[in-house]
Image (cartoon, rainbow, N blue to C red):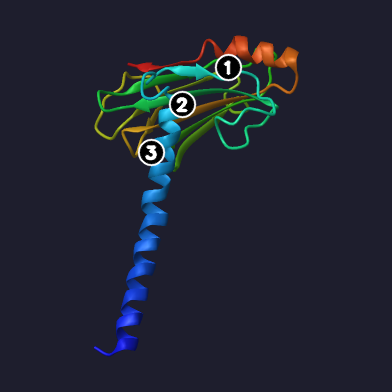
């Protein structure tokens, strides 16, 4: 093979490797780091953690909003399904619950506009059984993150959101 052909082949290989790293490996690496941070290095799994009020120094996630109260649950479905419940806001404020797979895909989102009495569902891998009567979200990966966000633009509403989110549940069924 002549030199230009070899260079073109090397360039095509580098592009393919870069594409694979960007599309497949980078999201998984980002979520791995996020899951380790949010789960206190893997010590808190299938349980909600509650973040303090966001200020100028908060950087546990990229650019958190100072108008929101956050709760996060790093889930692991390798031993079975979990139940997720997010209490409604005490002051009828807005609550959003998002479920992310280990590759950063958002696999479900719920809010209190559609479920004003609170959000509840089972999270399970395909083939895992859940009790009748629960709505089911089928996860695409065994691990991931559930994020509860509540509108809390001032100290008083943050206190109300904090009290309400303490009733959140992320636990094995």
Q: Name the N-terminal-most of marks 1 and 3.
A: 3
Left or right relative to 171: residue 68: right
Task: Name the mark on residue 117.
Answer: 1
Task: Name the mark on residue 102.
Answer: 3
Q: Identify the residue shown where x is 41% and y is 55%.
A: 23
Frontmost residue, 99 versus 74: 74
**Marks 2, 3: nearer the viewer:** 2
**Marks 1, 3: nearer the viewer:** 3
Mark 2, secondary structure of its residue: helix
Residue under label 2, please give it.
38
Q: Identify the residue shown where x is 62% and y is 13%.
A: 162
Residue 101 visible? The answer is no
Q: Residue 38's spot in the image, x, y percent?
A: 46, 26
Q: Within 10 angstroms of label 2, few (less than 14), some, or many (20 or more) residues?
A: many
Q: Residue 121's spot in the image, x, y percent?
A: 43, 23
Frontmost residue, 146 versus 93: 146
């Amino acid at each position: 093979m002549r030199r230009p052909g070899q260079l073109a082949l090397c360039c095509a290989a580098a592009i393919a490797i870069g594409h694979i790293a960007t599309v497949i490996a980078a999201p998984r690496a980002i979520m791995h780091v996020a899951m380790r941070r949010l789960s206190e290095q893997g010590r808190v799994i299938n349980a909600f953690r509650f973040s303090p009020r966001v200020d100028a120094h908060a950087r546990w996630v990229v650019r958190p909003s100072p108008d929101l109260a956050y709760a996060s649950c790093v889930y692991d479905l390798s031993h079975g399904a979990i139940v997720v419940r997010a209490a409604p806001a005490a002051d009828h404020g807005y609550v959003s619950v998002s479920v992310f797979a280990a590759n950063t895909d958002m696999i479900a989102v719920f809010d209190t506009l559609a479920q004003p009495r609170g959000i509840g569902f089972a999270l399970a891998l395909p083939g895992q059984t859940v009790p009748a009567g629960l709505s089911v979200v089928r996860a695409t990966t065994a691990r991931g993150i559930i994020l509860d966000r509540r509108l809390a633009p001032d100290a008083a509403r943050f206190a109300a959101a904090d009290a309400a989110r303490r009733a959140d549940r992320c636990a094995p069924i």
